[in-house]
Image (cartoon, grey):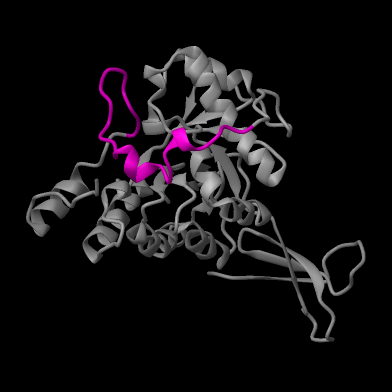
Amino acid sequence: MRRRAPSLSVGSALLVSVLALPPAQAAPGNPPPRPPLSDVLAVDPATVPPPDDVVSTRAVTCPSAGYGVRTSAPGSGKTVALTFDDGPGPETTGVMRVLEDPGLTGTFFDIGVNMTVRPTAVQALHSQDFLLGNHTWSHPDMRTQSSTTQALEMDRQPAEQRSLVGDSPCVFRPPYGSYNSTTLSLAQARGMSVWNWSVDTGDWEAPPSGSTYWTNLIVSRAQGGGSQTHPVILMHTQPDGCASTLAALPRIITYYRDRGYTFVDLLGGQGFRPVTGDWDGDGDTTPGVVRGDAWLVRNANTSGGASGSFTFGP
């Protein structure tokens, strides 16, 4: 089953979609529109053996999670968090490269089943210090699941992540933004803060091949967060493709950078990624790090402070 564009004229559809943004999160008893699982899952979960190391203990130390759902990007001043659900998918690497170019960060809520199909994408995200989040093993509506099933969904995805990159997620997003008190209690017990969003681009509705219509619509919806101090923007990198999201992302980044926002992940990180290069032209490759749009480089393979720094962007 494939997604379709709305059956409105282009002009009417743009006006309705821009003025009537989707709700920020699911309300109890009023579930949001949702894609069919054939668009969300890369493979039938029944054909994928669950990981062996399914335990609720953590391999990393997470900040205090607390109880409840968060929808405001962390940090002081004006901050914006770009978040990507349902991956990894064919555009995950492209999205990562768009963010890497100006040295920005983002949070990727991957599905455990999908991670088994594209493990190298998960490893690439981790190696570049993007924040990996838990989006369950097989993307069920958590409100319809028993406590036991919810716990398994939460535990199997981190087990898969540990097998690929050696650590577990500290942030959790329930599929469809749908949760109940059991969901919140289980996440808190596992040290995971629960995150929904404040800006929904609705990009999952776009045809996988992309179009100018959908790219413009995604950009317009994302810009709706410009009236917020700490927007959390929902986008997707689902396995059946999200070409319009990838095309829209540079324009969304430009919009928020031009308005003085700092890009953060959902733990408040601004990006801290290792890089190497011949910074002084002497023929030796030496280390550096990227934090936000600032590059700090060292001209010797020894410990110590930066030999120099420079920035990209305005």
User: Where on the picture, by quarter, is residue 213?
Assistant: bottom left
Residue 159 to residue 188: above or below:
below
**Mostly what secondary structure, the magenta segment?**
loop
Residue 86, image x and y in percent?
44, 43
In the visual, does 53 lie left or right of 249? right
Q: Which residues are magenta?
A: 24-51
Residue 29: x percent and y percent? 27, 17
Give the residue displayed 89% in from the left and 69% down from the top: 301
Residue lying farthest to the front in this orientation = 47
Closer to the camera in the image, 308 or 94 = 94
Instruction: Based on the picture, tell me whether residue 27 belongs to the magenta stretch.
Output: yes
Magenta stretch contains residue 216: no
Report whether residue 195 is seen: yes
Q: Residue at x 54, y 45 (%)?
A: 115
The residue nearer to you, when weighing 168 against 256, is 168
- The residue positioned 41% from the left and 60% from the top of the image is 249
Q: Is residue 50 left or right of residue 240?
A: right
> Quick check: can you spot residue 77?
no
